[in-house]
Amino acid sequence: MPLAALATVNDQSVRSAVIRLADEFPDLGPRSIVLVVRTCREELRGSPDGALPELVERLARQRLRVSLP
């Protein structure tokens, strides 16, 4: 499993989602956002490459919203 997690480090869908979501959720720490985005990316690994950036960001955004009080 660690190898799969490392593969997301250079993934454009992860980087772009983290940047946008950090702006959208400034009260959350960057580590929390990165963890949620990487987890979402791993869960969506069977999705078509062209759809990944949008799917990853949408799923991560939803999970971050639910985690806020």
Image (spheres, rainbow, N blue to C red):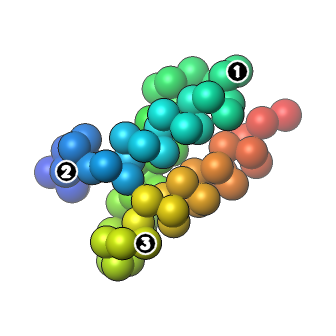
Q: Tag 3: residue type?
A: Ala
| Residue for point 84% across, 34% down | 69
Q: Is residue 9 visible?
A: yes
Q: Are marks 3 and 2 in contact (CB under 8 Å)?
A: no
Dot 3 surroundings within 10 Å: few (below 14), some, or many (20 or more)?
few
Residue 68 point in image, percent of width and height: 78, 36
Towards the viewer: 5 or 25: 25
Which mark is drawn over residue 10?
none
| Residue for point 54% across, 54% down | 57
SS class of the residue under badge 2?
helix
**Camera-nearest label, 1 or 3:** 3
Residue 33 point in image, percent of width and height: 53, 35
Q: Is the residue 29 above or below the residue 51 in the image?
A: above
Which mark is drawn over residue 27?
1
Which mark is drawn over residue 7?
2
Q: Tag 1: residue type?
A: Asp
Q: Tag 2: residue type?
A: Ala
Residue 35 point in image, percent of width and height: 45, 39
SS class of the residue under badge 1?
loop
| Residue for point 64% across, 49% down | 61
Q: Residue under circle 3?
A: 51
> Considering only order in the chain, which callout, 3 or 1, is on the residue closer to the N terminus?
1
Q: Report, in whole angstroms, how far the alpha carbon at label 2 lies from the one at label 1.
A: 27 Å
Q: Report, in whole angstroms, how far the alpha carbon at label 1 lies from the one at label 3.
A: 28 Å
| Residue for point 31% across, 49% down | 12
Quarter of the image where one finds residue 41: bottom left
Q: Is 54 on the left or on the right of 41, as rendered?
A: right
Q: Is residue 5 visible?
A: no
Dot 1 surroundings within 10 Å: few (below 14), some, or many (20 or more)?
few
> Total label count?
3
Q: Is 24 on the left or on the right of 16, as rendered?
A: right
